[in-house]
Image: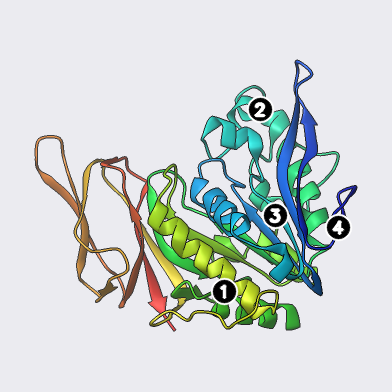
Amino acid sequence: MDIAGVTVARGTKRRHAIELVELADGTRISLPALFVNGAGAGPRLYLGAAIHGDEVNGVAILARVLTRLDPARLAGSIVAVLVQNPLAFQADHRLALSHYLKSPLDQAPADPWTCFPGNPDGSLAEKIAHMLFGLIRTCDAAIDCHTPTRGGRYVPITILPHPGMGDASRRAEELGVAFGSGYLVKTDKGMYVRDGILCVEATRAGVPAFTFEIGEGGRLEPDMVEIGARCVENALRHLKMLPGEPVRPAKTVRVREFVGMRAMRGGLLTTEAALGASVRRGEVLARIHSVYGDELETFASPVDGVYVRSTTLSTVAAGERVVTVGVLE
């Protein structure tokens, strides 16, 4: 296996630092990668985490999978970038603050997740997207691990690319179902299926891919890590890269649309519904009170569905997201 200028022998793993950018003091920043070349022939899978720097659960998920993976049992190969946005990860923030705040106009766009296929001569975000896309295009499938930004929490949810991209979309859905997170989104609207998103552009390029959201931004959660690791191992089994069959969840909730609600008033936020619960139209999910204790706003579900994303912040300002409900297929 030859990748990123290195050779990985059959049946071995190799850690590698992929040089990314030079800082003002000459410090060179690199992407921490792990390449696994299995003992037998098979497909190549791309695994990526922390394209936003506060998405630490994804890093731990990939680390757990790769640590317990025996290359001698693997058919095919894995290209894993454990931290896809190292300067943001260092800051424990969604974006690379040191660059974004220094010269925001020069650094725009700032979010590499929205910049695919990237630009080698562009901003830091575009450079990251370009480098990652070069790796992704050598693979047969890709999984992009996320959490919400700090202050948000998702159920373990697999979000498919836009369904209108032919055979690659179909294969992404097959992989997403086998992944077995228990929640699956197939939609043609919203930010997760826009042009420029990693999984959309990968699938458009013929590499079936999806976005996986799990847990809460800025927190390392061992129970979420184990769920995510099981799901990634399911994907490896589905691709026949590991022996055995995927472990199916007790049920899979299929969602066709996200409906989000934002605060019109600012104050103290309390949430009344349990994350993952089935909700009925009109059911109260959250409330906002003033600092004096007055109830300012009540959030009732606008649809029947499932409560897929909560805001974990104790206070919100007007305009901030409070709840997200998934409309069932």
Secondary element at image label 4: loop
Secondary element at image label 3: strand
Q: Tag 4 or tag 1, which sits nearer the N-term?
A: 4
Kindly check if marks 1 and 2 are in contact, taking CB atoms under 8 A apart as contact: no
Residue at screen point 68% across, 30% down: 105
Q: Tag 2 or tag 3, which sits nearer the N-term?
A: 3
Between the C-alphas of marks 3 and 4, the distance is 16 Å
Between the C-alphas of marks 1 and 2, the distance is 38 Å
Quick check: 142 left or right of 222?
right
Amino acid on which disc 1 is placed: Asn
The nearer-to-camera label among 3 and 4 is 4
Q: Tag 2 or tag 4, which sits nearer the N-term?
A: 4
Q: Which mark is residue 9?
A: 4
Between the C-alphas of marks 3 and 1, the distance is 16 Å
Q: Given the current orientation, which residue lies at the most extreme front position?
A: 72
Residue matched to label 1: 234
Residue at screen point 25% across, 75% down: 281
Residue matched to label 3: 80
Position above or below: 284 against 153? below
Q: Given the current orientation, which residue lies at the most extreme left position?
A: 293
Q: Tag 2 or tag 1, which sits nearer the N-term?
A: 2
- Disc 3 crowd, CA 10 A, few/some/many (<14, 14-19, 20+): many
Residue matched to label 2: 99
